[in-house]
């Protein structure tokens, strides 16, 4: 059973980094408080004795879905790029992908 | 139609009949609703975008089809408000988020395509909590929607815009989506009808995902029959959604017309009521249960012992799925991009800046919660355990449906609360979905319909009806029976009690 660890300011900063959200430092304490309350409540799931119960990931029994391998209409290049913040040479233009160091 | 008829007061069924019979044109109907939106939406704020030109063009096409003698679909010429979480080609789709501001999708959701094919006139896109995370629409980046019953109160959420549009006669129909109650809870607090169909009944293609194993689009309306007509229009198998159920859609329209509960066994769920539920909610619910007995149903109490854990399981499963789904909003392929010109930032830095600027606090909370629940060391205790609880909740439903045809409960524990009241107390906000969440976890269908006003505040109360998977028709049969009996008792529809705007 899970203990309910308390969430610290550093934990929030770490989670924000993992989630790629550049949070302002002055917001970390407030998020820590709120996440702590929420996690305390959701930790209730550990009260249920369910060791022999199968996990349910989905309401329907999922099977892979195939379709015939034939060409069908799809978005044009221009349509696919139409919502992009930046485009160059008919491609998505993105900032540099390598770090400087 | 006489000139004195207010076209915005008609039901969808009446509107479709009037258009088909040539008593009124679809353009006149659309214009009446666009005028109504102009007159009242400044105060209600149900819409994020009104597509005047597109609506009038769609209505003109219906009128031309009729003039040429073509057969019209059962909802041809009926106006509808579309929740802003479904794509419509060329029309802004924001999901209530700053991060998608200005995005015009290059394709239609399957729901949108089916509405267009049926001659439904889409008026515009409705307000919602950002990415459907919330129970009040206050988490919309574009400002809250106001409840037409009391503009100081919440219209429910996340689909508060769709429910408020229907309740304020801006549209007879709307599309909502329901991940934990976002169709049913807004219906309850606005005195309207809302249905979450069985998971897989309505295609999710073009529905911007919140939690893929829970999301389901469905109808919002002022009457049970109107909801059934819309349900029948949007439901059905779709090869573009790999989770779409390839089974026949139950005849929900026939069920709404049947409206007969004689001989049915109806279970009152012991765990969804009592403590924590407002006195006036309990009173109207108990009266309606008595009414069902009077109509010839056999009412029994049933226990679903794991339902008290549904909220906890949901707030692990939903954030886990959401944190993954929302990773795609990174400022690279669509939506806004922030902080590119500040030095020579890396793609990761731009993503971080874009997401911090683009997401509101509730989205950030849930992303972090999901990231936490899925992280090594906590996965089994949180996400894994929540999935087991989900199994137990589905088993509770299965056991209850062994002895009952449908289950009932109040839809929400209270009537509409004040705007701002729970905005910075996430857990208090989450508790408003306590009765609706179990059906999402199990994938079973549910309806909310109005059953009166709470005596203490004069605000609408909703009853939830729940049925087994793919037995959505039972919701409409029972709902229509309750609706007819209450209409006879009240003498007029409940929305006529609402103050005029």
Image (tube, helix red, strand yellow):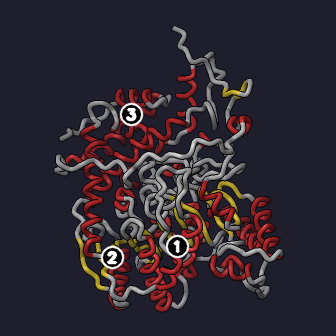
* B30 horizontally vs B363: left or right: right
- Location of residue A23 in the rendering, given as x and y in whole percent from the top left corner: 48, 30
Which residue is the site of mark 1? Answer: B192
Mark 2: which secondary structure? loop
* Labels 1 and 2: the sequence-earlier one: 1
Write down the residue under mark 3.
A29
In the image, farthest residue toward the top: A101
Image quadrant where one finds the N terminus of chain B:
bottom right
**Mark 2 surroundings: few (<14), some (14-19) or many (≥20) residues within 10 A:** some
Q: Chain of mark 3?
A: A
Q: Which chain hosts label 1?
A: B
Front: mark 3 or 1: 1
Query: How dense is the environment of label 1, judged by Cα within 10 Å: few (below 14), some, or many (20 and up)?
Result: many
Would you name the residue on which mark 2 appears? B405
* Residue B136 in view (yes/no): no
Q: Position of residue B372 (x, y in %)?
A: 35, 35
The residue at the point 57 percent across, 22 percent down is B347
Q: Disc 3 vs disc 2: which is toward the camera?
A: 2
């Amino acid at each position: 059973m899970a203990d309910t660890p308390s969430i610290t300011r550093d934990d929030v900063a770490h989670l924000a980094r993992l989630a790629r959200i550049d949070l302002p430092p002055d917001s970390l304490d407030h998020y820590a408080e709120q996440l702590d309350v929420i996690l305390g409540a959701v930790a209730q799931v550990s009260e249920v004795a369910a060791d022999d119960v199968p996990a349910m990931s989905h309401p329907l029994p999922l099977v892979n879905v195939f379709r015939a391998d034939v060409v069908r209409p799809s978005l044009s290049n221009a349509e696919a790029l139409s919502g992009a913040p930046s485009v160059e040479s008919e491609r998505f233009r993105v900032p540099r992908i390598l770090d400087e160091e | 139609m006489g000139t004195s008829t207010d076209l915005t007061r008609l039901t969808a069924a009446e509107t479709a009949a009037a258009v088909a019979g040539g008593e009124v044109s679809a353009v006149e109907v659309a214009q009446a609703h666009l005028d109504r939106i102009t007159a009242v939406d400044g105060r209600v704020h149900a819409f994020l975008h009104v597509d005047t030109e597109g609506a009038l063009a769609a209505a003109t096409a219906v009128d031309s089809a009729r003039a040429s003698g073509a057969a019209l679909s059962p909802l041809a010429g009926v106006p509808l408000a579309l929740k802003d979480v479904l794509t419509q080609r060329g029309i802004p789709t924001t999901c209530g988020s700053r991060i998608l501001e200005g995005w015009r999708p290059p394709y239609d959701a399957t729901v949108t395509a089916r509405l267009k094919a049926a001659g439904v006139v889409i008026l515009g896109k409705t307000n919602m909590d950002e990415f459907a995370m919330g129970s009040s629409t206050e988490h919309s980046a574009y400002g809250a929607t106001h409840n037409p019953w009391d503009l100081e109160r919440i219209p429910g959420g996340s689909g508060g815009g769709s429910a408020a549009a229907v309740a304020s006669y801006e549209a007879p129909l709307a599309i909502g989506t329901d991940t934990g109650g976002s169709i049913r809870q807004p219906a309850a607090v606005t005195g309207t009808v809302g249905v979450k169909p069985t998971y897989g009944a309505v295609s999710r293609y073009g529905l911007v995902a919140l939690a893929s194993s829970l999301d389901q689009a469905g109808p919002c309306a002022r009457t049970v029959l109107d909801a059934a007509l819309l349900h029948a229009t949007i439901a059905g198998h779709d090869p573009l959604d790999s989770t779409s159920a390839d089974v026949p859609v139950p005849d929900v329209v026939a069920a709404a017309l049947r409206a007969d509960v004689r001989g049915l066994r109806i279970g009152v769920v012991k765990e969804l009521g009592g403590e924590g539920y407002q006195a006036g909610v309990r009173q109207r619910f108990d009266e309606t249960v008595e009414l069902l007995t009077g109509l010839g149903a056999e009412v029994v109490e049933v226990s679903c012992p794991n339902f008290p854990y549904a909220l906890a399981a949901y707030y692990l499963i939903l954030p886990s799925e959401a944190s993954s789904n929302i990773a795609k909003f990174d400022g690279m392929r669509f939506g806004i991009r922030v902080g590119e010109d500040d030095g020579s930032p890396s793609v990761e830095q731009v993503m971080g800046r874009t997401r911090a600027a683009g997401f509101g606090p509730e989205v950030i909370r849930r992303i972090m919660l999901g990231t936490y629940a899925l992280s090594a060391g906590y996965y089994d205790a949180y996400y894994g355990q929540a999935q087991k609880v989900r199994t137990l909740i589905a088993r509770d439903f299965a056991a209850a449906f062994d002895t009952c045809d449908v289950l009932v409960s109040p839809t929400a524990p209270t009537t509409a609360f004040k705007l701002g009241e729970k905005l910075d107390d996430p857990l208090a906000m989450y508790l408003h979905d306590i009765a609706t969440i179990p059906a999402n976890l199990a994938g079973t269908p549910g309806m909310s319909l109005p059953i009166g006003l709470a005596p203490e505040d004069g605000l609408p109360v909703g009853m939830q009806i729940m049925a087994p998977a793919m037995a959505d028709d039972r919701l409409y049969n029972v709902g229509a029976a309750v609706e007819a009996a209450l209409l006879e008792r009240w003498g007029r529809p409940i929305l006529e009690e609402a103050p005029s705007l």
